Amino acid sequence: MDSKVKIIPLGGVRENGKNMYAVEINDGIYILDCGLKYPENELLGIDIVIPDFSYLEENRDKIVGVFLTHGHADAIGALPYFLSQFNVPVFGSKMTIELAKINVAGSEEIDDFDDFHVVSDRSEIDFDDVKVTFFKTTHSIPGSLGIAIRTSLGAIVYTGDFKFDQTAKPIYATNYSEFTKLGDKGVLALLSDSSNAENPLPSASEIKIADYIYSTFNDHPGRIIVASVASNIIRMQQVFDAAAKSGRRVYLTGHDLERIVNTAMKFSMLTLPKEDLLIKNLEELKKIDKKNVVIIQTGRMGEPIKALQRMANNEQGDINIEPNDLVFITTTPSTAMETTVAKTRDMIYRADAEVKMIADEMNSSGDASQADLQLLLNLLHPKFLIPVQGEYRLLSAHARLAKQLGYTDDKIKIPSKGDIISLTEDEMWIGDSLDIADTMIDGSGVGDIGNIVLRDRKVLSEDGIFVAVVTIDRKKKRIVSTPKLTSRGFVYVKANKDLMSDAAQIIEKTVLNNLDNKEFDWGNLKQDVRESLSDFLYKQTRRRPVILPVIMEVNQHHKKNTKKKKPAASKKQGN
């Protein structure tokens, strides 16, 4: 009996990061990766964004497990939030599982979760109607694995982040023979990394990148601050090697970075070229000549760019950017971060330091180039291609590469989040689509920030807030005192006295009209004040601030009390 196969992207398509794909085979759901993404500029105040788990909540009994490709945030970052709702097993390589444990350990709700399972490229996991296998891939972190879900129709293959590098060291090397074996056995659908699909140039080999890092360290006469993603283990090794070779020592900033480095060293996936390479503490750092120092900065949750901004503004604490420092950015920012990176570089130069980026000199991406993507298609010969991991332009570029190899439109689907892609042995189509939204994390709040709150934050950031406080005597139908007006981020009050005076008169008129109404209603009063103020302020300034009316009622009629005179009571009637 043939399997019923559906693939549902819950994230990771038409966006950068947040990779999560549900593969539904008969009555089982196999989750591929569980990642997050960092917010773009318009998501004001949001810390991170994770996938929407609504569909999985409705089908929680079908979930077989979570299968992870590697240990970066775009693949494991949402695990703490997922596991707080679903108690299912998690599978990944030794390094990936250790990083997942570190990630989950910070969550009090699931600090006792221990259903982790270490797998390798030799592992086979048999379920009733499905077998899950893994294959080694090359990425910037050891232990990266692709995933193959074998069904009666053929395998569903998910690459995760990958590239081909003929010079990769054994712990990073791709197992090419496994690709050919998969292709020979039959691949029904390929979910393939599209993050670098627009790049026609081959990725620089890690040997060339290592040489470039060493020459940079050797040429600069002062202190070097390296900005890198904490879990980019191969870059950490290259920095360690270059520092030792150039007579420098390394200082790690942040507890998270130390834990990741110690974990990688524990499994011999990161080695120290000399025993005293790492500087133990700030006191020791201050005693060392700056020309012999390398500081690795990763920032909170591995975000080095924002950390550099704080360092440039002397807001980071004990270590900030100083004159004659070299800030060496070894991460490759996404297109969405280009404006932020340009701003950061400017801030560093203002701090009288230099900036250098690997991405300016060579193609240092950890993701597959165009030639890599086409080689993968030729090795696997999948019947159908589903480009994933990237914005629409990248998915579309990946599709064009496949068409150059003879794939037709009916063999390729560029999905949106929530699309239900159904497959048979000979056909692939998108039927229904789920209503999928982003789940935004702000502080300790999970999913309590929606479009309305974001809209208000956007308005506040653009047009500010206007507060009007009015005290009324409802029984006497009069305003007790002149409205008090406050503005923040809208206009400078002292320079706009006429505007504020006219606004006060409009509020008084609106309030008196409502007091004369026999069917007086607090909600109508506040809404009328908002509308009348909004119309007036827009006509005068062409801006629409958030208007917050605060209406107070005073009651001057009390029962006599011979013992002690009580002050008049007032009550606040909401916002």
Image (spheres, rainbow, N blue to C red):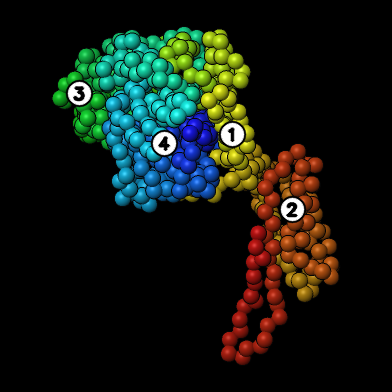
Q: Nearer the viewer, mark 2 or mark 3?
A: 3
| Residue at screen point 39% across, 48% down | 87
Residue 102 in sight:
no
What is the distance, in whole Å, between disc 1 and disc 4 at their CAs?
24 Å
Which of labels 1 and 4 is toward the front?
4
Labelled disc at residue 419: 1
Residue at position x 76%, y 48% in the image: 534
According to the picture, the residue beneath numbered tag 4 turns out to be: 129
**Which of disc 1 and disc 3 is earlier in sequence?**
3
Residue hosting label 2: 530
In the image, 283 versus 484, the foreground residue is 283
Q: Secondary structure at mark 4?
A: loop
Q: Earlier in the sequence, mark 4 or mark 2?
A: 4
| Tag nearer the camera, 4 or 2 | 4
Q: State the residue position of label 3.
A: 272
Left or right of 329, for residue 272: left
Describe the element under mark 3 as helix, strand or loop.
loop
Q: Secondary structure at mark 1?
A: strand
